[in-house]
Image (spheres, grey):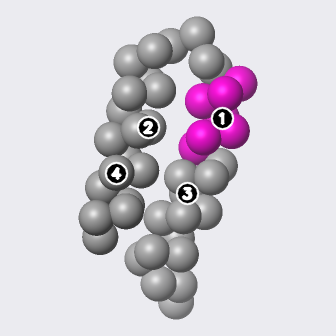
Amino acid sequence: MYRNSGFCLVYSFYTFHFMKFMHSHYQMTIQLNIKILICIKI
């Protein structure tokens, strides 16, 4: 199994590119930033 940090990094990477594709939704971008901050804290 992958470590949580590794999975979180990959998840954030793909989520970031998806949000770049859907960049018209600012609230989703804020949620993405919160997820990344949570990933960094863990």
In space, the residues marked 2 and 3 are separated at their CA atoms by: 10 Å
Tag 4: Cα neighbours inside 10 Å, few (<14), some, or many (≥20)? few
- Across and down, in percent, residue 22 comes to 63, 20
Query: Which corner quadrant of the image does residue 18 belong to?
Result: top right
The magenta segment is 15-21
> Which numbered disc flags the more N-terminal residue, 2 or 1?
1
> Which numbered disc flags the more N-terminal residue, 4 or 2?
2
Q: Which residue is mark 1?
A: 18
Of labels 4 and 2, the one closer to you: 4
Question: Extreme top residue here?
Answer: 24
Q: Are the residues tagged 3 and 4 within 8 Å (C-beta)?
A: no
In space, the residues marked 3 and 4 are separated at their CA atoms by: 13 Å
Q: Which residue is mark 3?
A: 11
Residue 17 lies, with reference to residue 24, above or below; the image says below
Between 20 and 1, the one lying in front of the other is 20
Q: Which residue is mark 2?
A: 32
Of labels 2 and 1, the one closer to you: 2
> Which numbered disc flags the more N-terminal residue, 4 or 1?
1
Of labels 3 and 4, the one closer to you: 4
In space, the residues marked 4 and 2 are separated at their CA atoms by: 9 Å
- Across and down, in percent, residue 2 comes to 53, 84
Give the amino acid at mark 2: Leu
Q: Which residue is mark 4?
A: 37
Tag 1: Cα neighbours inside 10 Å, few (<14), some, or many (≥20)? few
> Mark 1: which secondary structure?
helix
Point 41% across, 38% down: residue: 33
